[in-house]
Image (cartoon, rainbow, N blue to C red):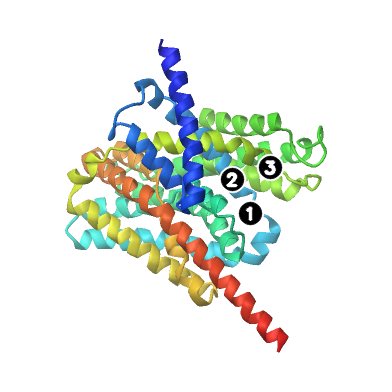
Amino acid sequence: MDQAVLLIALGVLFLGGLAADYIGRTTRLPRVTILLLLGLLVGQSGLGLLPEEAYGWFEPISVVALTMVAFLLGADLTRENLSGHGRTIFTISLFIVGGTTAIVGLGLSALGVDPGLALILGAIASATAPAAIADVIRQSGIRNAFVETITGIVAIDDVWGLIVFSLCLAFLHQSGHWSGPVLTALFDIGGAMVLGLIIGAPAAFLSGRLKPGEPLQIEAFGIAFLTAGLALWLEVSFLVAGMTAGAVIANLARHHDHAFNEIERIELPFMILFFLLAGASLHLSVLSEMGWVAIAYITLRILARLISGALGARLSGVRGVERHLYGPALLPQAGVAVGMALVAAEMLPAWETQIVPLVIAATVVFELIGPPITLAALRRSAAKAATDRDAGGRKTAK
């Protein structure tokens, strides 16, 4: 009977995901937001229709789904993309991470939050939600210079965020052994990059040989699952490992016509379950429990994104309306931030009861409002590009 209930639940979730995809296409709402709301409706804060066993799927599904997202993000870090947008990608990503940490940290401290707690919350605020942003980009169908830059920023900004978070954690570590968090972060990121190279290099030359032009679906499954599993076993970042492997394959696999088509095809079922279960796991009650601190954190993070994104874009030479679109497009925040919060709570137990509920409360908000704002920014960039093309055509005609 338990197996029957689980299979029924799985079938309903997939059909619900299909309905969300249809609603997203007809209403122009982000599929991510619809899936999260649907999960919220059937989950713990809603009707409670999901069996308890279903929540146990969330962790393994999220690892696989995010690893596939990381592969696709890494695939955009090609020599061509970096030569065209590299300066903008690195400048804006550094400003986004550094500016968010500083503005949120200083803002909370000025409002009376303990400076140490404010600093670690600022570092956590720098994290983004690569899966949500990647899904919105894919759903939009927009492909222009702005989207290519956003994709590159999302691929690397969480790396900078993890480094900043680890440095802040090391500074605040009460035992005085500051080297522990720093060495852990270096191993987490460095080890993941090495793992990505070890998997990506042979995959670049071996995959796509059985069927010329693109890897088989079973190859895509094998590479994605192997990367995720080895990253968990070695206790390194599966996001960074997947991103590195994707970048290596994209730059070395010259015999591929479509190196990542199969990952894009197999990714959707995992993404549907990931967002539905993420929504089902959300607790709306934490919003009311956190009060003004949560409101301040959310407000400051929005301001930080707007300010630091615009400053980074200005410094990297971006002109026109796009300069002000990078911050809004990078607003979503989800699993990476929660992971940081759990690590911070373990390392700084005195603040555990403040860090975890606040970050979870903010995640609820940013998971729901972030994707629509990202989609609006993408459409604004597309509209601006179309206007520029029309203006250029009129000038040529004259």
Relative to 220, say whether 145 is above or below.
Answer: below
The amino acid marked with disc number 1 is: Leu
The amino acid marked with disc number 2 is: Met
The residue that appears at 53% across and 27% down in the rendered structure is: 233
Circle 2: is it few (<14), some (14-19), or many (20+) Cα within 10 Å? many
Relative to 128, say whether 357 is above or below.
Answer: above
Where is residue 275? Give x, y as percent.
Answer: 44, 39
Residue at numbered disc 1: 77
Where is residue 222? Give x, y as percent.
Answer: 66, 29
Residue at numbered disc 3: 261
Residue at numbered disc 2: 243
How many numbered marks does the figure carry? 3
Along the line of sight, which residue is nearer the eye, 169 or 6?
6
Q: Is residue 319 left or right of residue 57?
A: right
The residue that appears at 58% across and 39% down in the rendered structure is: 68
The amino acid marked with disc number 3 is: Asn
Q: Is residue 219 visible?
A: yes
